[in-house]
Amino acid sequence: MNYSSIKKQTYITIITFIFLLINVVESHAQSSAYTLDKQEQKRTIDSICTQLKANYIFPDVAKEMSQLISDNYKQKVYKSITDPNKFAARLTKDLRSVSNDLHLRVNYAPQQIAERRNATSEEERAKLEKRQIARMKRDNFGFQEVKILNGNIGYLDLRGFFPTEHGGETAVAAMNFLSNTEAIIIDLRQNGGGSPQMIQLISSYLFDAEPVHLNNFYWRPRDENTQTWTLPHVQGKRNPDADVYVLTSKRTFSAAEEFSYNLKNLERGTLVGEITGGGAHPGGTINVTDKYMVWMPQGRAISPVTKTNWEGTGVKPHIEVSAMEAKLKAQAIALEKLKTKDSTRVNFYNWCLKEVETKQNPVKLDALSLKKYVGSYGSREITIEDKQLIYQEKGQNKHKLIPMGDNWFMLEGVDYLRVEFLKSDNDFVTLKRHFQNGHSDKSSKT
């Protein structure tokens, strides 16, 4: 299990990726004060060609890409481009026209390059790293939301796989929080990738202690093969028996695709959503001049199961639905499966399913219909505020009523209680409260 050899490369990759995201606006602002000339164009193209030939994962493709942009320069294709960001965008487009590699990207980033080059002393490097870590902390190392959904289903909204050197503690806390759930939904719909280390750590909580082979990598610059496996030891508690669901979208990319691909082929998770972006070539950024850098794919993933990867094709989910529908669809599937596992809790899971189905197919009532429910039912008051039915116990907080049908409603923010309105002579005269535990009571309209 040779994992340490990719550790440094991974760290540089994710740190640089974060900086690229942060500095997009800054680089565009700088470009308005800088006019590109043909000497800078040639210097940039020559350097890119050198780096492609030395580092790009496929040497033949590197040669072809280099030939294209060199010929374009000679034929004065780029002559009219004076905006440095537009030049970067055009080079990216031309390189991808040959490689179809969505990881490959040219960026105009003079400030970022200068910041990295100027960090020559130990003290300056420490300051730079501190600023980088602060930026990652503001994103909570990718962990956007962790919670328990009704039905004891864990939910993790993960926006990036940050380096475990800094995000590991947050990952451990999140996975331990989910350790007692019976199913886990991992939302990668807005996850653009990151560190294989974080994939390894999070995956380890979904398997037993016996290491599982996750992925292989080939790195062209070093002519080296590496592997990643789940960890034999983790902090806290694993959850190897929970059903796992991974939400995907067209924006799910790179490391987020690897995580999805791994779990799919290891038969550890059910993927729900859209086919992913299709980027399987890891790498890092290379400064090609003092103004331009290239995100250069230098390796390729090779699954131990499929012997290939998802480059250019994306990861196909088990259940294809729109990204917007994926979360509720996964909840419904999870609850249906949990019903089959425990016959003593069928009513509970049906209760939870009804909530999900209501959200999947919202019921709308017109203003005239809403008035029929208004009134006092013992100590319970039903009113209308901003075209919304409101339920309030005497002296208690107000709750919006969400229609589940003509006469059934959920209370917003209250999982354990629902109300039913009963008719007599075509008028609603009784409010019946239904509790999750099966208990119910009635209040007559006064």
Image: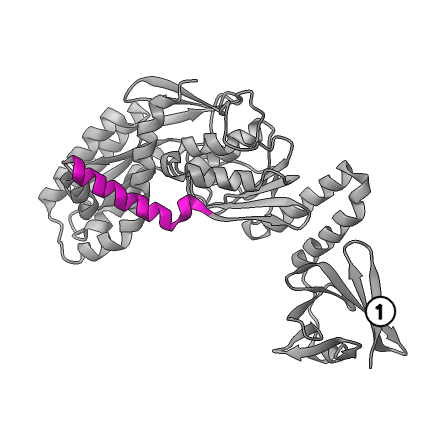
Identity of the residue furthest to the left in this view: 39
Residue with the mark numbered 1: 442
In the shown orientation, is residue 351 left or right of residue 132?
A: right
Which segment is the magenta one?
Answer: 122-143
Residue at figure coordinates x 36%, y 34% from the top left? 165
On the image, the x and y values in percent for residue 431 come to 81, 71
Inspect the magenta stretch and tell me whether residue 407 lies in it.
no
What is the quadrant of the N terminus in the image?
Answer: top left
Colouring chosen for the image of the structure: one colour
Q: Nearer the viewer, residue 426 or 236?
A: 236
Q: Which residue lies at the image location 14% right of the left edge and 36% below the top edge?
A: 120
Quadrant where the image shows the C terminus: bottom right
Residue drawn at the location 35% of the way across and 45% of the way down: 136
The secondary structure type at the circle numbered 1 is strand
Tally the numbered discs. Answer: 1
Where in the figure is residue 65, as x and y percent of width and height?
A: 27, 32
Q: Which of 244 and 431 is in front in this view?
A: 431
* Mark 1: amino acid: Lys
Q: Is residue 141 above or below residue 362?
A: above
Crowd rating for badge 1 (residues with CA inside 10 Å; few <14, some 14–19, many 20+): some
